[in-house]
Image (cartoon, rainbow, N blue to C red):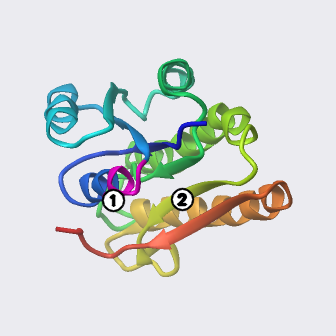
Amino acid sequence: MNKVCIVMGVGPGNGEAFVRRFSDEGYQVAMLARSKDYLLQLEQSISNTYAFPCDLMESEQIGTVLAAIRDRLGPAAVLLYNAGGGVFKNVEEASLEDFEANWRINVQGLVAATKAVLPQLREHDTASIIVTSASAATRGRANTAPFASAKAAQRSLAQSMARQLGPEKIHVANVVIDGVVD
């Protein structure tokens, strides 16, 4: 069976670094992001990579795209959820829409991706879900209310998933990366 890794949230920096690393390790890497042109550029420059444009704020797109990945590459053994975004405002300045947008990309997208990919992961003896996070998941600062609250929810979700899926040999990790991998 082919080794397939899905990297969700590919951009210059961390996302691209993850794609390069998994490609170097012999994985076929499905790359998801909104920027079709950027993904196609990476597909041309990094071996064993495949562009799958997807807006991770639109949860109905996620299931469709993950099914297309399975059809083209085979079942995923690794899901790396690197999608995220932040509105950096305090609780007074931030709108309810700011909070909702942060929650949708950091939490709802992860839930939609997990639900869609679990059947694929279960086809392997062992599999992984890796969630990239930030230190905001463990402590909020004055001007990070929407971002910190969404990252804290994402961290708790990953912990819950780890306890549920661990007995099935699906490892779930929430990794704090403060900064950009160059």
Magenta span of residues: 21-26
Which of the two residues, 125 or 143, is positioned nearer the viewer here? 125
Q: What amino acid is labelled 1 in the image?
A: Arg
Q: What is the distance, in whole Å, between disc 1 and disc 2 at their CAs? A: 14 Å
| Residue 34 placement: quadrant | top left
Choose the circle earlier in sequence order: 1 or 2.
1
- Quadrant of image for the C terminus: bottom left
Residue at left 34%, top 68%?
90
Q: Is residue 17 magenta?
A: no
Which of the two residues, 148 or 110, is positioned nearer the viewer here? 110
The residue carrying pointer 2 sits among few (fewer than 14), some (14 to 19) or many (20 or more) residues within 10 Å by Cα, namely: some
| Residue 152 placement: quadrant | bottom right
Q: Which SS type dominates the magenta stretch?
A: helix
Report helix, strand or loop for mark 1.
Answer: helix
Measured as percent of width and height from the top left, residue 36 is found at: 22, 26
Q: Which residue is mark 1?
A: 21
| Residue 171 placement: quadrant | bottom right
Q: What amino acid is labelled 2 in the image?
A: Ile
Q: Which residue is mark 2?
A: 130
Report helix, strand or loop for mark 2.
Answer: strand
- Quadrant of image for the N terminus: top right
The residue carrying pointer 1 sits among few (fewer than 14), some (14 to 19) or many (20 or more) residues within 10 Å by Cα, namely: few
